[in-house]
Image: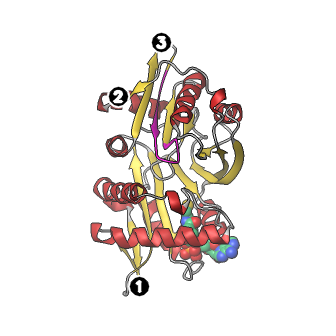
Amino acid sequence: MTIRPMTPDDVPAAERLSDEGFHELDVRMRRASWPPPERRSGRHSQWWTDRTLHLLRTDPGGCWVADDGSGLVGFATSLVRDTTWCLATYVVRPGLQGQGIGKALLDAALEHGRGCLHGMLAASADPKAVRRYHAAGFEMHPQMFLTGEVDRSAIPVVDKVREGTPADIDLMNSLDRQTRGAAHGPDHEILLQSWRLIVSDSTTGSGYAYLGAGHTVVLLAASNRRTAARLLWAALADAPADRPVKVSHLTAANQWAIDVGMAARLELHQEGYLGLRGMKPPTPYIHDGALL
Ligand SMILES: CC(C)(COP(=O)(O)OP(=O)(O)OC[C@H]1O[C@@H](n2cnc3c(N)ncnc32)[C@H](O)[C@@H]1OP(=O)(O)O)[C@@H](O)C(=O)NCCC(=O)NCCS
């Protein structure tokens, strides 16, 4: 078994391994996968591939695979932005888990963030993942999610929200620094290529949200709760009617999002953890599961 840097040629096999690992976890946790298989589009796979190739360009030292000679049996991808290290994706082949491969991969990825004061990761509910992250010094903050069909009669008039453009990148980096202590920097380029961006920038506050198919909100940051709520309402208003939405990655520090969800008559549930090292849960903020 060797632990070696990931290369672009590894990406298709890594994606298959990720699908396999998370599908097995869904079955083990008796959890419905999201988006549901019938709503899974090539877009989901494209985003995964584009994002991983992007990380290989920006953070080659943060992306590692475990190879047993016959092929990939695990991998970990990570990134450093400003003073923050983030874990993007982390999987070991089902059947080979619990034997130390994950520890070797995570140690290699953590080495990339050696000089960082802060750390972020979105942990699955897999007890093995939680054990690894706790051993690496991460505190676990339970994540909630909202789901259901939006009560369209509850949607307020949403004003002061416009389409975003690449000219908003400086503003977004400032909001990232204010809310999570680190700009997304080059990640905004790939987020802009992949998702619709909405921005609110007025005298009372600023914020942005990337809107994804099915997930509704990929990433949201704002200078105050009122602006964050306005952006979340705009996202919900944009979601397809008569189809369930899901807004993931909500921490207890973001009650404003739960207030919006309750007003929209969505259901609140729990799923996994936001793992943090050297920082408090960002707010008003909805993190991306991989770029955080
Ligand atoms: C999370 C994951 C990558 C870790 O890789 P791994 O090879 O299983 O990890 P390791 O064997 O190095 O470490 C697992 C730890 O959990 C322990 N463990 C094993 N089975 C366990 C169980 N059923 N419950 C709790 N702990 C368990 C192991 O003893 C080990 O802890 P230790 O080092 O203190 O003894 C892998 O389990 C996985 O792919 N899970 C499914 C996908 C997932 O959840 N990925 C993380 C996304 S955030």
* Callout in the foreground (3, 1): 3
Report the side of 148 relative to 186 (left or right). right
Task: Give the camera-side residue of 287 and 160.
Answer: 160
Disc 3 residue crowd, few under 14, some 14–19, many 20+, Cα 10 Å: few
Q: Is residue 252 above or below residue 167?
A: below
Image point (48%, 37%), residue name:
181
- Write down the quadrant of residue 284 in the picture: top right
Element type at marker 1?
loop
Spot occupied by residue 149 in the image (x, y as percentages of width and height): 64, 42
What's the amino acid at mark 1?
Asp
Determine which quarter of the picture holds residue 151: top right
Task: Give the Cα distance between marks 2 and 1.
Answer: 45 Å
Measured as percent of width and height from the top left, residue 4 is found at 35, 74
Residue 99: x and y, percent?
57, 81
**For the magenta stretch, what is the residue range?**
206-218
Where's residue 26, x and y in %? 62, 67
Disc on res. 203: 3
Q: Which mark is residue 68?
A: 1
Determine whether the residue tagged by mark 3 lies in a helix, strand or loop.
Answer: loop
Magenta stretch: includes residue 217: yes
Location of ligand 1 given as a quarter of the image: bottom right
Task: Name the residue rendered at 56%, 53% in the picture.
Answer: 122
Mark 2 and mark 3: span between their CA atoms?
Answer: 16 Å
Closer to the camera, 211 or 238?
Answer: 238
Q: Is mark 1 within 8 Å of ligand 1?
A: no
- Disc nearer the start of the sequence (2/1): 1
2 horizontally vs 34: left or right: left
Residue 128 in the figure: left or right of residue 168:
right
Q: Of the numbered discs in the image, which one, if any, rests on residue 168?
A: 2
Mark 1 nearby-residue class (10 Å; few <14, some 14–19, many ≥20): few
Quadrant in the picture for the N terminus: bottom left
* 210 in relation to 225, above or below: below
